[in-house]
Amino acid sequence: MTGTRPLYTSEALHALGGNPNVSHAKAARELGYQPRPLRTTVADTYAWFESAGMLKKA
């Protein structure tokens, strides 16, 4: 409608609207997967971006 490329394709939107009840049980059982707390993951990600010089100091 706007003449610009859409941000999301119809396929991507379909995938995003898929089954919201995804389980990691099989990965935990067969691969020993152990999810980490979100807070820890975000803190580690921020620290990595900072150490890589990808964040500006305030």
Image (cartoon, grey):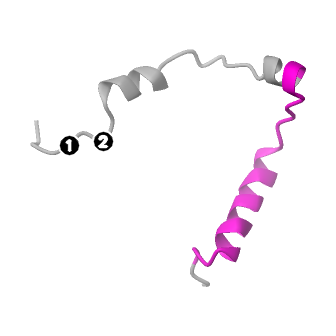
Q: Residues within 10 Å of mark 1 (few under 14, many from 20)?
A: few
Q: Quadrant of the N terminus?
A: top left
Relative to 54, is 48 on the left or the right? right
Helix, strand or loop for the magenta stretch, by majority: helix
Q: Position of residue 26 (x, y in %)?
A: 80, 17
- The residue singled out by tag 2 in the image is 7
Residue annotated with mark 1 = 5
User: Left or right: where does residue 29 sit relative to residue 18?
Assistant: right
Question: Does 35 lie within the magenta span?
Answer: yes
Could you tell whether 4 is left or right of 39 in the image?
left
Residue type at mark 2? Answer: Leu
Disc 2 to disc 1, C-alpha distance: 7 Å
Q: Is residue 4 above or below residue 58?
A: above
Residue at figure coordinates x 20%, y 43% from the top left: 5
The residue lying toward the viewer, choosing from 48 and 39, is 48
Q: Position of residue 31 (x, y in %)?
A: 86, 26
Element assignment for label 2? loop
Q: Residue at x 33, y 36 (%)?
A: 8
| Residue 3 in picture, x, y percent from top left | 9, 43
Residue type, numbered disc 1: Arg
